[in-house]
Amino acid sequence: MQGGSTGAGAATGAVFLSYASQDAAAAGRIAQALQAAGLEVWFDQSELRGGDVWDRQIRSRIHDCRLFIAVISANTEARDEGYFRREWKLAVDRTHDMAEKKTFLLPVVIDQTSDRGATVPDKFREVQWTRLPDGATPPEFAARVARLLAPESPVAPAAGAVRAQPGPITQPPRSAALPRGRSAWLRAVPLAIAAIAVAALGYVLIDKLGKRGAPAPAATGTTAPSAGATPLTESPAFAPPPHSIAVLPFVNLSGDPAQDYFSDGLTEELLNSLAAVEGLQVAARTSSFSFKGKDTDIATIARKLDVGAVLEGSVRRSGHTIRITAQLINAVTGFHLWSKSYDRDLGDVLKLQTEIATAVASALKVTLLADTAAKIELGGTRNPAALDAYLRAARANQGQDVDSYVRAIEAYTEAIRLDPGYALAFAGRSFAHTFYAGQGATGPAVRENFDQALADARQAIALAPELADSHLSMGFYLANGDLDFRRATGEFERARALAPGNATVLRIYGLFVITMGRFDAGIADLRRAVTLDPLNVISHYLLGRGLYWARRYEDALAPLAEAISLDPEHQPSYQYRGLAYYGLGDFDKARSACEPKPKWCGTQWCLALAYERLGRHADAEAARARLWEMQGESAAYQFATIYAQWGDKGKALDWLDTAVRVRDPGLTLLRDDSFVDSLRKEPRFQAVERELRFPD
């Protein structure tokens, strides 16, 4: 048995209530609450169904009603057939003739039925759902329906408008279309660079100790929060920055899980576009994407990321055509600020990014300047096939192994072949070649890959000199492939000036300048990166690592502990926690911090140092031997520090010479590393310092 009936009034402007017969009691409670608020509800309570007259009446009521409430439940999910499904189809068909901003469909869930994967028309997924457990209908919902029916009120706010909402502030429901859900230095850099990051390492330079030893939603009106949810106002401590936002991973509605790379990639592109908006604080990619596939409510997400607004949406791709729906929710009040659907050719994605970013900025009352709008499209492509190859490169590299660099290089090369002016692809390929040279190539291939990385970085800068990614890739090459720290500093500074709100740029720049002796500036940027990317283990790990390099050993322990709590298997955090204890002179704690992760080459370095201080020379020598087995000459700088700490200056200096010969990025640490303090007065050490061209 289904809804649609001859109940309370049939006049145009009434609410049509559609339900499965098993949900009659709950639907009746909704109808009674709306009627008590003085609203007309078309609600069939009879047991008689069928016949042409009755069917025509149903069609007439759906055609004439102002709002269509669809009651969704386990009962509707269990029925593949039912007259309520015909009602749903008729309502959806009517929307095709409506203005885009008109509110008509109001899906309501009366039990624990998940919005993710529910058997409902796609149009239902484009609007915010409301949860009314067992039909319990609070006055706020009835008031909202009344506002939507009021002829003197606009049906939906204009894009960017914020409509005041009376009544208690509660947590909004999840949208059906929106399930929730490198270590190297590049974790949340714009998409091309994020694709090259190696999330297991988290290093600012290619740390040779990580080389081989590491094992929708278009809601057309302002939507009220759901009933029965916890009021956001109950937590007075939650006061996020006024212009702050998180972009949650857009849901792939293409029906093909293999297309996840595409929806994820477009989300990252949009996230980075918003990060370019002056005055807007944007939660970084890793923290936002940590909710992917999780049914986490908006209030929890907002608090964890400390943001005042959340942007979510969905992507449906068919060939070279895409449909993107997006909605912006005020995380403090729980109400919609803006929502819209876009149908575009893939070649218009760059323009679409600007459109969405402009609308979001307007809704947040942030001015999108002309130069910022230009930045959003900078370095991109209008070639659909090139864009697809570019996004595949991002996904390929998420394997976090040497082979992933090869796959990424191949995909970037395809993107560049299809669009020789694709600056982001050149920047991304430059990173891939630098990583591969440092972590996968051997023999002549090392130099060949470094040379290609330099050529690609130069081309990226030539094509898009105002693109932060271009300068970041050049700085990354100079620091790793050329050991020219003076020029690398200039490139990193340029990237930071162009993208001051990008968490990855801040991590890279902050950690690098610490190694160059600018402790306060570097630590400030690393702390800012934690604020922008609070759920990213790399943010906390690199802050701890930076504090360690600044010789603030006690301060380093807390962020390293936080990193381990976020990811108990993040081995580099154990390594640097052990080194911090070593710096504090607590050699036994250094040992106990590093011993749990014996397969990580960095902890073997730590143990070689700690065991020797504890008088366990045989164990120290065994740890040094294991490090050699794992890394060979790639760990030349670490061997220099081991022998320096063991008091063998001759071998330490020999290994420093080797580090220069193999271009070990560990030499970045030389300027302020306490492990080599005993060598600083040695002429051979001073010659190495001069060769490395540290900035003044």
Image (tube, grey):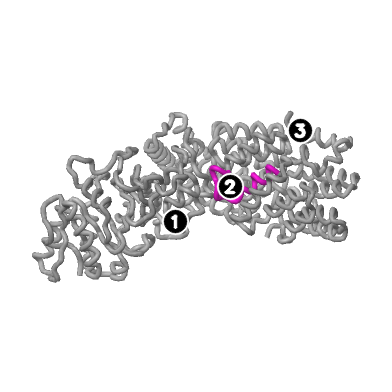
Local packing at callout 3 (Cα closer than 10 Å; few below 14, some 14-19, many 20+) is few
Helix, strand or loop at mark 3 = loop
Between marks 3 and 2, how big is the CA–CA gap?
Answer: 27 Å
Local packing at callout 2 (Cα closer than 10 Å; few below 14, some 14-19, many 20+) is many
Foreground residue among 384 and 378: 378
**In the image, which residues are magenta?**
530-547
Q: Quadrant of residue 120?
A: bottom left
Query: In the visual, does 126 lie left or right of 594?
Result: left
Foreground residue among 176 and 389: 176
> Which residue position holds label 2?
187
> Which residue position holds label 3?
693
Query: Relative to 121, is 235 above or below?
Result: above
Query: In the visual, does 391 lie left or right of 64?
Result: right
Q: In this view of the protein, can residue 386 be seen by the observer?
A: no
Query: Looking at the rendering, in which quadrant would you find the C terminus?
Result: top right
Amino acid on which disc 3 is placed:
Arg
Amino acid on which disc 2 is placed:
Arg
> Which residue position holds label 1?
296
